[in-house]
Amino acid sequence: MRFSLTQKAAAPVIGDRCVRHLLRYATCQACADACPVAAVAVVDGNVELAEERCLHCGDCLFVCPTEAIGGITTVMRHYLDDMLVAPLSFRAASTAELLVWHRLYHLRAVACDPDMQPGWVLAVAQLNLTLRQYQEPQWSIVLPGDDGVDTSRRTLMRAPASAARSARVPAGRRVLRQLYPQMSDWLPDIDPRRCQLCGACWRICPEQALRLENEYMVTESARCTGCGNCQAVCQHQAVTLSAGPRHEPVRQLPLVSASCTSCQRTFLAWRTDRRVCPTCAQHQYGMRGHCC
């Protein structure tokens, strides 16, 4: 009998935290949109991941709003001073991943040959467009050998261990919100003409980007990860979710106290002329009455 001392790597999987597993009307498909080989797809309302197609590139990890993807780790990358160096992955890092490197490791360049690795040149160009919106320093492409840095694989293998370092960065939209709190990548908004203040949206929001504070409806876009839970549970289509990035301050929408003519309880409303609370409004013919 033979025993293997190596453990098989876990297969990539969409976990229970996926919003499509939690909410019937969820529309999030960020992972499917990010996958370069269509290994992730939405089928009959559920997210499916084809293990045989997966490249383990990690692009899906950086866009998932709830960190629901398991069995995949972010790519191990190598850096020297303030630049990524060889060996570089054949597929360039996504903008979301490079934003994490930018903030956590203060990197500002990629050392590569543009003719041999055009994908990385494009990745830096796309990153710089986002950095410009974020009002952050730009990245550049450094040719191998510039500034005395030879980034060939053979040279790096001969280099002292202290010269080039390697690391993986954490992934997820929550990470980006923590690293760039001054920016809003997703902008939730409430339409007071439709909203009944039933509370479904702020109770389902995992980031508390929507919340009730005293007599204010608060929207804090900088916390929003774009999961779409608020839209999925709103029966009145009062919530909209727009893409950023944008500098968006915390908004406080004032509410007023009103008295329900059906149950005589005090409730919050948008206008003083509101006479029926959200709960009683859903009970026709006085079914709620005075018993609840």
Image (cartoon, grey):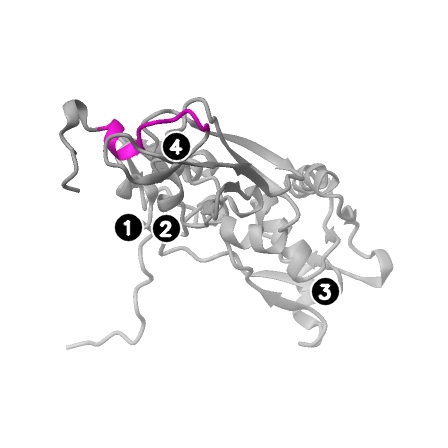
Mark 4–mark 1 Cα distance, whole angstroms, equals 20 Å
Residue placed most toward the observer, 181 or 217 = 217
- Asked if the residue under mark 3 is in contact with the one under mark 2, i.e. CB atoms within 8 Å, the reply is no
Q: Quadrant of residue 167?
A: bottom right
- Asked if the residue under mark 3 is in contact with the one under mark 4, i.e. CB atoms within 8 Å, the reply is no
Q: Report helix, strand or loop for mark 1.
A: loop
Residue placed most toward the observer, 5 or 96 = 96
Magenta region, main secondary structure: loop
Numbered mark located on residue 68 in the image: 2
Q: Is disc 1 surrounded by few (<14), some (14 to 19) or many (20+) residues within 10 Å?
A: some
Residue 243, given in percent of the width and then of the height, sits at: 55, 32
Q: Amino acid at mark 4?
A: Gln
Q: Report helix, strand or loop for mark 3.
A: strand
Going by the image, does 36 lie left or right of 139?
left
Range shown magenta: 271-282
Q: Which residue is under mark 3?
A: 80
Mark 4–mark 2 Cα distance, whole angstroms, equals 19 Å
Mark with earlier residue (2, 3):
2
Q: Is disc 3 surrounded by few (<14), some (14 to 19) or many (20+) residues within 10 Å?
A: some
